[in-house]
Image: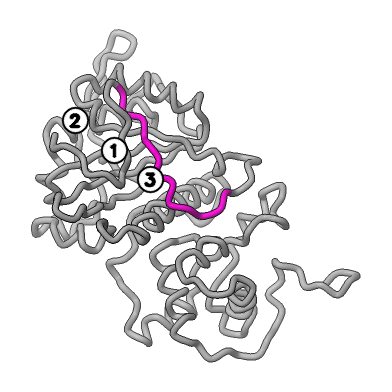
Amino acid sequence: MDALHRTSRWHRGSTKAVQLTPRDLTILSLLQRYRYASTEHIHAFVGGQKNRLQERLARLYREPNCYVNRPAQQRQYFNANYRPILYELDRNGERALREQGRFDDDAPVTWLNCRRDGRTGFAHAVMVCEALASIELGIRGNTSLRFIGWPEIKGRIPEPARHSKLLHCLRARISRQIKGATQVCDKALAPDAVFGIAYQGHGARFFALECDRDSEPLRRSNLQQTSYTRKLLQYHQVLRERAYHAQWGLPNLLVLSLTTSELHMRKIVALAEEVCGDVRRFFLFKTMPSLGDFAPPEPPTGRLLTEAWLRPGLADFRLDQAMERG
């Protein structure tokens, strides 16, 4: 508490125990699906009076059972005290969902299992969460579209692969000439997220999302090390061999590449045109500057669904519009 008797937003403090309401359980379920969600995004999903929601989230954070948490990593932002607060599900929140029969063991996807420590991992996870939230919020406002989450996609995966530890990965053996020598890599490809959109009367499209905050090198001299070149080579192989169908049972796959600056996006596009050749039409590119360092957060909208994505060599593409089969 400061000199004006205001409680710090980072201090749990102590309040009376709360009786969880159906709305509280909806919030906890949302935080199970989205590892991190800001007050703004939670409000966009659950509605109601925003100030009442903020007060309730504070109660859920400060009450003895601590149903939600405010991740400490967000305090590393230079303007942390003025940004919308980010929340995550606390262990007691998970327990409450289990007791109510509302915990879904199949809900988390690979991006929910990001490292809990380290600013880079945290910032990247927030970017993935907010990108998916933007798309899902847009779909919620369009009755002709339906969001297809990981649990439904998992149901398409053939047995026994459905129980594999590499369930969220795609196998892709790649090779490349680097400094006169052929290097080979067998590492699995793990997208940041996988989801689908069902278009009324037009089937469904499925997407692998890749988020980059300009922190991943474009090229490296060792194919065993992470780089955007290796990632594009892996997707090139997956798309040519239709590994997404063999391993996940999906009829199609587009790759969404989201980064934080126009300059970096253009570099990735040029790299994709060099590396991917005949399958480059399956790659879509866009920027989300609000998720870069020092950038103010943008209000939650469905703009990643309704705004055009760049598609090299072809017309731009909007995710809310059904696309020709390819």
Label 3 element class: helix
Around disc 3, counting alpha carbons within 10 Å, would you say few (fewer than 14), some (14 to 19), or many (20 or more)? some
Read off the residue under disc 2: 237
**Secondary structure of the magenta portion, mostly?**
loop
Read off the residue under disc 1: 255
Around disc 2, counting alpha carbons within 10 Å, would you say few (fewer than 14), some (14 to 19), or many (20 or more)? some
Label 2 element class: helix
Among numbered discs 1 and 3, the one appearing first in the sequence: 1
Q: Amino acid at mark 1?
A: Val
Asked if the magenta segment contains residue 310, the reply would be yes
Whole-percent x, y for residue 15 in the image: 68, 86
Observer-nearest of 182 and 280: 280
At x 41% / y 58%, what residue is drawn? 137
Cα distance in 3D space between marks 2 and 3: 29 Å
Quarter-of-image position of residue 252: top left
Quarter-of-image position of residue 5: bottom right
Q: Foreground mark, 1 or 3?
A: 3
Q: Which residues are magenta?
A: 298-312
Cα distance in 3D space between marks 1 and 2: 13 Å
Asked if the magenta segment contains residue 287, the reply would be no
Q: Amino acid at mark 2?
A: Gln
Cα distance in 3D space between marks 1 and 3: 17 Å
Q: Foreground mark, 1 or 2?
A: 1
Label 1 element class: strand
Say left or right for 288 vs 307. right
The quadrant the N terminus occupies is: bottom right
Read off the residue under disc 3: 306
Q: Amino acid at mark 3?
A: Thr
